[in-house]
Image: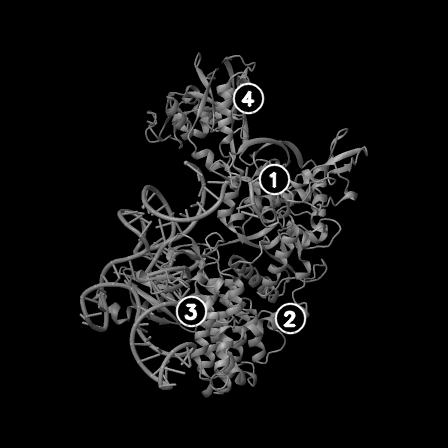
Amino acid sequence: MTLSLISGEGLSQDILHNLKHSNRNNKMTTERYNSRASEPHWQKIWDEKKLFETNTDVESGKEPYYVLEMFPYPSGRIHMGHVRNYTMGDVVARYKRAKGYEVLHPMGWDAFGMPAENAAMQNNTHPKGWTYDNIASMRTQLKSMGLSIDWSREFATCDVDYYAQQQALFLDFLKHDLVYRKNAKVNWDPVDMTVLANEQVIDGKGWRSGAEVEQRELTQWFFKISDYADELLEAIDELDEWPAKVKLMQSNWIGRSRGAKIKFPLIEKNGTDTNELVCFSTRPDTLYGASFMAIAAEHPISLEMSKSNPALQAFIKECRKMGTSAADIETAEKQGFDLGLTVAHPFIEGKTLPVYAANFVLMDYGTGAVFGCPAHDQRDLDFARKYDLEVTSVVATIDTPDMAVEVSDTAYVDDGVLVNSGPMSGQRKEQAINTAIDVLAERNLAEEEINYRLRDWGLSRQRYWGCPIPVVHCDNCGVVPDKKENLPVELPDDVTFDVPGNPLDRHPTWRNTDCPSCGKPAKRETDTMDTFVDSSWYFARFITPNGETPTDRAGANHWLPVDQYIGGIEHAILHLLYSRFFSRAMSIAGHMDIKEPFKGLFTQGMVVHESYRDKDGAWLQPTEVVLSGEGKARKAVHAKTGEDVKIGGIEKMSKSKRNTIDPDDIIQTYGADTARWFMLSDSPPERDVEWTDAGAEGAHRFVQRIWRLVSIWSDNVKSANAPDSLKDEKANAIRKASHKTLKAIGDDIERLGFNRAIARLYEYVNTLSSSGDVKKSNADLDSAMKEGLSFLIQCFAPVMPHLGETCWEELGFDGLVSEQSWPQHDDALAVDDTIILPVQINGKKRADLEVNPDASTKEIEDATLALDVVIKQLDGKTPKKIIVVPKRIVNVVV
RNA sequence: GCGGGUAUGGCGGAAUCGGUAGACGCAAGGGACUUAAAAUCCCUCGGCCCUAGGCCGUCCCGGUUCGAGUCCGGGUACCCGCACCA
């Protein structure tokens, strides 16, 4: 069944149920819990009591805890991924608040970016209006989730107040030599006259215009992140609350490699006036296997030679068309252009190597030149095979150190022993690299160099909807930073998007200003900042969202780093690395003294859903599809036409595949608590979770189940005493289960094991439901249930806070559950009186043994040997060995 | 291409340090209640031999160990990321 059918006329199923049964007046039928009434009610009360507003005062006395979910881009509607992300953070926030921390849990909007401009072009709207409208509707949606957020700190990165501070930061960075200008390549769409993002280049063509994309050089601003490459790399080790995967991705991204810068004297100069070619190599040990040199198409030598060589010009042009992404470069067919140059081999007297311009050599890594050693580098091998160049293997395996490895289609890149390699012969890779550098260094032909894959961060964007870069171009003074007292440089509102290009460029007046240095008329910079800049410091702004400087240094030092940061794995590299750089840069500029912004990081999985297509291949929404049958007989038809629908794969919810579920519908039908509960149940939080209607219904059944349990016990609990030395056996069993569960759930939440905590809560409700009959209850049982239910409510309230409040009130407990301290479990009650030890014979389980947890090894051995099964299996023989693992297992080896 | 990840019933998953594989949920089947439906409650639910019970079983092949889903070596399949999307 589809959701639209369940929700009927827009009434939730609980209201429908209660309406149907309101006349029955049967005492044993409790009213169904009505989330539609209860959720707004509690949200209003929390709001009025300002329950979630944080006292960020450094002197507040409580220990600070900062939990933050990656702030959303205001696309217009929240999606299930947001629900999952923000629920996780909210559970942590509510739990930590109960544990006595002063919790900071804010929300904001990553509000600059291309989609607003695209919408402006498509729908003739203004990016600003579009963005703020989206924020307004998403805020309403997020609020309906019942998140314990301090909304008084909310801001959007497109708020003038925010980007004014960002401009101030930029000026500070400029002062501290953390930003500079240089030329860089961009994807240029010659028809739309605009710069394209990599993702807007499809098969080498612009996504809108279809025109062939060119690589064009522009002067742009760069952050000097590569100066911090080593520091950013080394500090990764100390991020012990980050996923190993993310740490590895960051190290690879920084890509430190040690190698040598090697000079090759030019022999055949073919008309150039260059005397040497300098290349970078991490494998100078394999120089004896070199058979050619390759330089980037954009290498100065290549560019110089192209002036008098039209064929080379064409080749360079061809290379420029190629995509700039790593995947494009690695997968493109290797192509070269013989420049007619040769260089001298540094080790082999009289040997020369031909020089090619090649498409697989990057100008912006190393020196833009490499020596080609085909036997020991796959790219070089591919190139050599194509141009029929010599392949000389100079490495042997460690097992057969005398014979060079034979190379046909796959280069040998692993460790080994060098052969036929002069001074390096007989040495292992690492040692040989050192030898090569040392020998060449003596002849002044090489020096050791550390290179990083990490490049400086280009922040200039030729777009309107971003933070203006606060500099002025003056004919007299050149590039002049704005003065801080002149900030903000505000974006003009009167812009149009009917013509291609950046509206700031063609604005009649905005560009005109006076030079801050000489006072003469000058022009503003029209580039705006990369939106990654906006998100690189927002976490620091939440501490003093209205401050007149970017941060309050003492406050930032008190609250940062963020204790728990939660977001998608897609930000594993750039956003997190940029934020790490920004924290360092902000420390240098005196805004705080924190180098690592995020102490704990958690990357959650996506929300996925089945996708559907009609007979013409058009994507259909889940609400347009009616499903029936199961397994192979599972069928889908169109809800309106009845035509067959093809059931597609389970994929990330996306607008293009129309397989999204609107959280609003779910909240209307089942309530926010159900949505929150389901998003955390089943799948571990770091993995993808599949949205299914059945799963949501299951979660909702549980909501009702809790409500029934609480309702039927409410009278008994209200008149019960606190549990103390209970005689009733069942009551004691409940107490033990309660304390055990409480302990386990606390541990689970601390470790973000939400799915495990939820499984435990299911078990616990099963235990409470089956442990006592309310009609035959006694004072002891009532007491145990009073404690048990209070633990239950407190344990699930972080996930289902509205239901928690309703149940708390129903049982007559004081105050709000959201204000309660986390209950303390009693360790003595959280352990079992007896434990069941599995007894294995030769590693196979044959029996159970019930023992006291403190039983000695001897006692366990004796009890084991007295078991019928063991006696039978031993058949009079003495066992070879008895392994007793305390509190775990017994294994009898026969 | 490079880098990373994952693999357990019909499905999502649990098993925290190498110690009872399949907790918990979903789906399914059977039953109770009901005029009926919904809701709820009870039972079954990895496969095979089916007898108390036994044998097999965590992607595949091998190894270490009293004991392997977990550790080691080799392989297979699928998924994700790759610098101007946020």
Residue indicated by mark 2: A44
Q: Secondary structure at mark 1?
A: loop
Element on which disc 3 rests: loop
Tell me the kind of residue under disc 4: Leu
Q: Is residue A828 visible?
A: no
Amino acid identity at mark 3: Asp
Which residue does the numbered mark 1 point to in the structure image?
A500
Q: Which mark is residue A303?
A: 4
Residue positioned 47% across, 75% down in the render: A705
Sequence-earlier tag: 4 or 1 = 4
Marks 2/3 same chain = yes
Q: Where A594 sits versus A415, above or below?
A: below
**Is there CB contact under 8 Å for labels 4 and 3?**
no
Give the chain letter at badge 3.
A
Other residues around mark 2 within 10 Å, as few (<14) / some (14–19) / many (≥20): few
Q: Is residue A633 above or below residue A500?
A: below
Labels 3 and 1 share a subunit = yes
The amino acid type found where label 2 is placed reads Lys
Label 3: few (<14), some or many (≥20) within 10 Å?
few
Crowd rating for badge 1 (residues with CA inside 10 Å; few <14, some 14–19, many 20+): few
Q: Where A457 sits versus A338, above or below?
A: below
Disc marking residue A854: 3
Between the residue at mark 3 and the residue at mark 1, the CA separation in whole angstroms equals 79 Å
